[in-house]
Amino acid sequence: MEPLVIVGTGLAGYTLARAFRKLDRTTPLVLVTADDGHFYSKPMLSNALARGKAPAELVTTPGELMAAELGATLMARTPVEAIDTAARRLRTARGEVAYSRLVLALGARPIRPPLAGDGAGEVLAVNSLDDYARFHAVLQGAAHVAIIGPGLIGCEFANDLLASGRRVTVIGPDPRPLGRLLPPAAGEALQTALGSAGVEWRLGTVAERVEREDAGYRVSLADGGTITADRVLSAVGLQPETGLARAAGLAVERGIRVDAALRTSDPHVHALGDCAEVDGQVLPYVLPLMEQAKVLAAVLNGGPQRLAYPVMPVVVKTPAHPVVVVPPAPGVAGTWSVEAGPDGVRAEFRGDGVLAGFALTGAATAARQALVKELAAATAPA
């Protein structure tokens, strides 16, 4: 029997493997990954510094133990070079691998901002344990870090770096942080709180050049300003890994296109996680990934499952001012109503009086459970 092959051993790949093994203990399972295959929680990368965690301490289960627990063959440090969908085979750096069904859990890669200057190639990004190891190593002795990008990851790293005792400057074109997720009042509350904690904001502009200066870097901004920092971190967003799927002839738009059963345009190939586009959406968060893994495990075992997301709050790890948000679905009509107090913001997005999304910051995050319950009732099928 040819195996089920999962490419990628990040949170998506391992969550699926575990869910699959709960339903099927006998089908051969092969895990192919370009990294070492160790299991760790990727969301922990952006709050590990304040906890004093070295890279090795983030590993919860070594790859060989994961393989043993799953009854799987782990092919670590084995990049996949091509997929032959007609022959149902992978070409890897270690030879060919046949599959009965293939799952792509390829994740996403950091978007690199278009920077000039002799230090541009030394701008860091953290999207994996290997990235964190490099980041952790070069931070030793660094007192000031410039972060390019005021979105979710940029804000989380800003809070984490501050808590680890470093100065932080955040650069971005938006007028306030988390501009794509939060209504203005909520973004302003986060900006004020992190600013009071020590973050310097350079918003309404972009970084254009990064040049080496002494032991650090000089970042030149479009508004004519400059920032001198010991290290520069880019956190401008992620781009789904689609190159392998595109080269194999699979349908690709923003991500690898899949249907409600997580099937690609080839019925023997599935995709999930940050690389997958479901119903026109790429959702690079943990809760969608968990739902996808549960459904796909059932599908791979012959079940007629179809993906239907529950209410999935996005929790931003900024302890200086916590944030929880459920953005309204694209195209939903409505308006934000906002209650702003000294300890936080409660914003509700309603259309015809029906809750369609919310954003909570600071002490207002205590309303999360009640609003999730109301939103679930409002969006439940009739």
Image: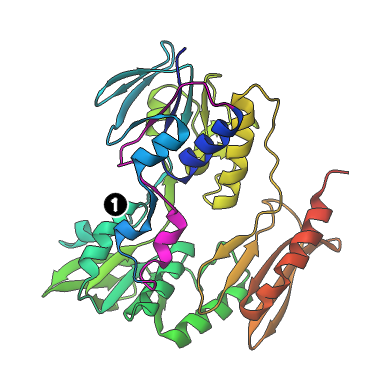
Location of residue 48 by image quarter: bottom left
Which residue is outermost to the left?
Answer: 214
Residue that appears at 50% across and 27% down: 251
The reply, left or right, for residue 79 in relation to residue 256 is: left
Q: Position of residue 89 (x, y in %)?
A: 38, 16
Q: From what the image shows, is residue 181 above or below residue 361? A: above
What is the magenta range?
24-51
The reply, left or right, for residue 234 in relation to residue 287 is: left
**Residue named by callout 1:** 130
Q: Nearer the viewer, residue 166 or 238?
A: 166
The reply, left or right, for residue 359 in relation to residue 126 is: right
Query: Does 84 appear in magenta?
Result: no
Query: Does 27 appear in magenta?
Result: yes
Q: Position of residue 207 (x, y in %)?
A: 32, 67
Provide the secondary structure element on which disc 1 rests. Answer: helix
Residue that appears at 52% across and 50% down: 284
Q: From what the image shows, is residue 237 above or below residue 217? A: above
Q: From what the image shows, is residue 361 above or below residue 246? A: below
The reply, left or right, for residue 122 in relation to residue 334 is: left
Q: Nearer the viewer, residue 365 or 20?
A: 20
